[in-house]
Structures are given as C-alpha cells and as structure tokens.
Image (cartoon, rainbow, N blue to C red):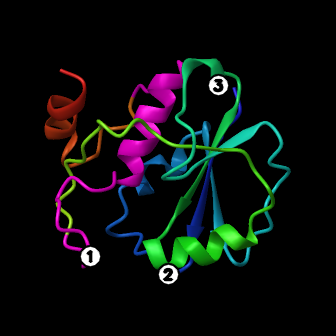
C-alpha cells in the first residue's frame, strides 16, 4: 500500500491540526509547501471538491491531500503537477465546528482527517487508529457511519 501523502502549507497551525497525530505513522508521509519537493505522484489521486467521485474501483491508488486553508490550497494546487482528482460523495457531513467566513452551513467541507478516513474507507484501505485522537470522532462517526 502506498503511503497517504499530505502536502501541508508551512503556515498550517500544527497545534490545531487534526492530522498531527498521524505524523508518526508509517502509512502517512507529510511534505511541507513550499520547501519539500513533491515525489512522483503517478499512481496517486488528489482529493478535491468538485472532481468525479471516489469509488471502490479506485482501489490501488494512493491518496494525495493538500492541507491548508481554502485560499492557500488554491495556490498550492497550481504547484502540483497534473494529478488525477477525485471527490468524496456529498452526503458526508463534518463534525468539525467551522467558523470560516463564507460558510453558512456548518456541515460545509470536511476536516482533513475526516476526508482521509472516508477516502481510505471507500478504497478499502486500513482506517484503524486514524480517528483515535480526533476530538469530534464520535460525532463524526454518528453522522456518517452509524
């Protein structure tokens, strides 16, 4: 299994980032924008809103996720080579309490950890322990899995 690649903006607040507990795992690799060069992304799919939906037929691909605010993520996407993109089905809901301007619906957009969990679940990849330290884990699972 290919490691899940997280391309994180250097301004991301690591103390508040839901992905920080995953940094020690062998099945995740963290890269910092703009200092770390991107590896060969062939065989990877990028998670992106508005792309064709991710399905079980995509199993075998690795996951690539940009971790930044919406504004910074748009800049980072331009630095990425052409990589196939997939989205998550729109019925999934976040448990993360959003306070962003322009987002009137508290369920708009998933937290990065939620998106990774769901994507790996769809692909049939291991999800054990991914949500263990996520504060809103129980609510997220209640909203989406139960």
* Up/down of 10 relative to 26, above or below: below
Asked whether 28 falls inside the magenta stretch, the response is no
Expressed as whole percent of the image width and height from the top left, the position of residue 8 reads 56, 66
Which is nearer the eye, 82 or 62? 82
The residues tagged by marks 1 and 2 sit, at their Cα atoms, a distance apart of 21 Å
The answer to whether any part of residue 52 appears in the image is yes
Expressed as whole percent of the image width and height from the top left, the position of residue 123 reads 55, 23
Instruction: Quadrant for the C terminus, please.
Output: top left
Closer to the chain start, of discs 1 and 2, is 2
Q: Residue at x 53, y 47 (%)?
A: 24
Label 3: which secondary element? helix
Bin the neighbour count of mark 2 within 10 Å (Cα to Cα): few under 14, some 14-19, many 20 and up: few
Task: Tell me the residue that label 1 is attached to.
Answer: 102
Magenta region: 99-128
Q: Residue at x 56, y 46 (%)?
A: 51
The residues tagged by marks 3 and 1 sit, at their Cα atoms, a distance apart of 32 Å
Task: Tell me the residue that label 3 is attached to.
Answer: 58
Asked whether 112 falls inside the magenta stretch, the response is yes
Closer to the chain start, of discs 3 and 2, is 2
């Amino acid at each position: 299994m290919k490691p899940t690649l997280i391309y994180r903006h250097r301004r991301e607040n690591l103390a508040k980032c839901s992905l920080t507990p995953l940094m020690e795992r062998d099945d995740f690799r963290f890269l910092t924008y703009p200092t770390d060069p991107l590896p060969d992304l062939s065989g990877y799919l990028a998670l992106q809103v508005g792309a064709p939906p991710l399905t079980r037929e995509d199993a075998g691909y690795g996951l690539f996720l940009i971790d930044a605010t919406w504004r910074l993520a748009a800049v980072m996407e331009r630095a990425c080579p052409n990589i196939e993109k997939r989205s998550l089905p729109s019925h999934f809901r976040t448990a993360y309490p959003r306070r962003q301007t322009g987002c009137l619906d508290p369920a708009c957009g998933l937290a990065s950890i939620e998106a990774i969990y769901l994507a790996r679940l769809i692909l049939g990849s291991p999800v054990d322990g991914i949500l263990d330290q996520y504060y809103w884990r129980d609510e997220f699972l209640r909203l989406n899995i139960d």
